[in-house]
Every structure is written in structure tokens, then in C-alpha cells.
Image: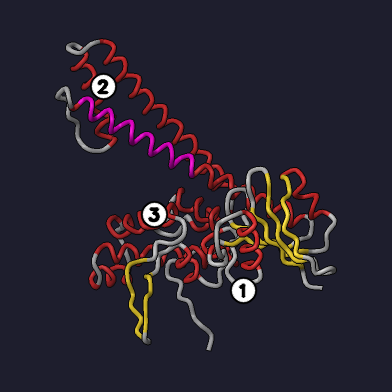
Amino acid sequence: MNATPVGVDLAKSVFQVHYIDQETGEIVNRQIKRAQFLEHFANRAQCLIGMEACGSAHHWARQLIQMGHLVKLMPARFVKAFNIGNKTDVADAKAIWLATQQSSKSVAMKTEMQQAVLMMHRQREQLVKFRTMQINGLRGMLAEFGEVMAKGRAALVKEMSGALMRVEARLPKVLIDTFREQWARVENLDREISTIERRLRDWKKEDKSVTVISEIPGVGLLTATAAVAMIGDPKSFKSGREFAAWLGLVPKQTGTGGKVSLQSISKRGDIYLRTLLIHGARSVLTRTKEPGAWIESLKKRRPPNVAVVALANKMARTIWAVLAHDRPYQKNYVSIVPA
């Protein structure tokens, strides 16, 4: 017997479930409280349960798979096409149920460790943004009193003590204390960011996949850990080209009448990992001593930004190949397609 397709619209407290009972033919569309959700599927025959890949989806997917069910996580963008009419919980559950039965690309389920690493990346990203806000605010306030410092955080760290000492003699003590407190927050943020990076380095030592892809030029600690955590199961992608397209590192295509036009990159997928790959590619193009023939030819034929994205695309495909085929990175490896 085929698995019964079930659409589940996840929420905070009450989940909406939609399916057709195979025995009675009854259309079931009901609400289930969070505490009773797993109990509802505990004694049922194997189901193909579809959910949007949103918050808590991976958690529930792991629980349902342990019960013997099949789970299909889908991008919300794909499910939206099946929602006809107003957006309600009932309509969303039905749209998910329809999308579950389509032969479409599903989102790979992540392990708890992979989710934990991604959360550390999100926390670090948030701390970096807040640190930048604090530094820019401090720069602006000191500039109003004639203390202008060079660009860059390193220059700010070097000159801050002297700047505070110079303004201390002519400004109110309450303002000087405020400046020192804000600078202390910046230093505390530096320590918190360093702590997260240390934890990521510890995971790198334990995870073989992260260590292997770190050998790829342009792939550092952040890129390696984020890629392994975000890709989930690398074999869920058919090829490295599909993985690069999933990250939005391929041109958008528009066409009509048999004519296809290539535009700028699609920028779909996760912005964070795509940004890390592009920064890594830019570092390789500007700093590497032995870039190789392919990169040298690319720099001659294409503008700098186009070359950066092309190299980021190649890095993404290399990451997939190393992880999917479970082999070490080889600098001069040439893929040979069998005849």
C-alpha cells in the first residue's frame, strides 16, 4: 500500500492537518494541538508527511521519521503556488498536501548538530552587526568633538585609548563614562564572537567533512562549517551544478519564442553561505600567489566581479563533489566522464 500523503501546516500551538483517509475516502482537515501532534501519527500506517521547511520543521521531521513515516520538507516558495484564494491555516494545509504529491525537489533534513552549528553562525552574524553599530556610533560621537580616526576596526582599536584621553580633559565626566562603557561593550562583543569561533574550530576537529573541505582554496573556518551544516545530506543534490544553483550562484534565465536570455545571478537560496563563498573567492583572486591557469584565464576574459562569482560557483561545486563522493580535495583533479 502506498503511503498516505498528509499536509501539515506547522504553527506555535495548533497544527493544521489535511489528508484523505484511504479506507473511508473522507477528507480530513482538522486542528491538532502541539502536545497531541506526535500521538496523532503514532499508531497510523506509514504516511508521506509534507511540511514547509520553516521553523521547527526539522525537529518534527526527525520525530516522525523515528516513527517510521516518510517526511518531505519543501520550500515555502514552492508550496505557495498551490495556495488558491485567501491565506488561512486550512488553505495552507491543503496547499502543502497538494505540493507533497508533486515530484519536486525537497529540502534535506538536518541533524541536531547541523542545526546547532547554523544557530552559532546566526548568533555570530548578529553579534558582528551589533558590534559594527556600536563602533560606527562611537566614531560618529567622537567625530563631533574633533576626534577622527582612520578606517577599519584595527585602526580604531589602536587609536581609541588616545582619543578618549584627549577628550577627557575638556568634556563632562558623564559623557566620558558613556564613551568608555560603549567601548567596553565593543570589547565584550569581540570576546563573544571569539568564543563562538573557538566552538566552531572545536567542531571542525571532530567533523571529518569540515576538515576535508577546508583544504579547498578560499574555504575557511566559517565557510566550511556553514556549508556542511547547511547542505544536510549532499546526495540530496544530483550534482554540484544543482548545489550551486540552489545557492543562487547561477544566472537567471528568461526566454520566449525559443530565445533564452541570461541575466545576473539569481541570488536564491541562503544569503549567508553565498556571501561567504563570494568573499572567499575574492580573497583567492586578490591574494593567492599561485592562482592557476583557469583563474588567470578567467581574470583576463571577465570583469573582476564576474570572475569572483564564477570562482564562487566553482568552489560550491567542488564542496559538493568532495562531500558527495567522500574523497579528499585534490588541486589538480580532472573529472573524466565515462564514454
* Residue 123 inside the magenta-drawn segment: yes
Which residue bears the numbered disc 3? 275
| Residue drawn at x 16%, y 22% as measured from the top left | 145
Amino acid tagged 1: Ser
Which residue bears the numbered disc 2? 161
SS under mark 3: helix
Marks 3/2: CA–CA distance: 33 Å
Q: Is residue 96 above or below residue 156?
A: below
Q: Which residues are magenta?
A: 122-142
Quarter of the image for residue 187 reads top left
Q: Is residue 177 left or right of residue 98?
A: left
Residue 306 on image: x %, y %: 29, 66
Which residue bears the numbered disc 1? 103
Q: Main secondary structure of the magenta part?
A: helix
Label 3 or label 2, whichever comes before in sequence order: 2
Residue 129 on image: x %, y %: 38, 39
Residue 152 on image: x %, y %: 26, 38
Number of the front mark, 2 or 1:
1
Number of the front mark, 3 or 2:
3
Label 2 or label 1, whichever comes before in sequence order: 1
Number of the front mark, 1 or 3:
1
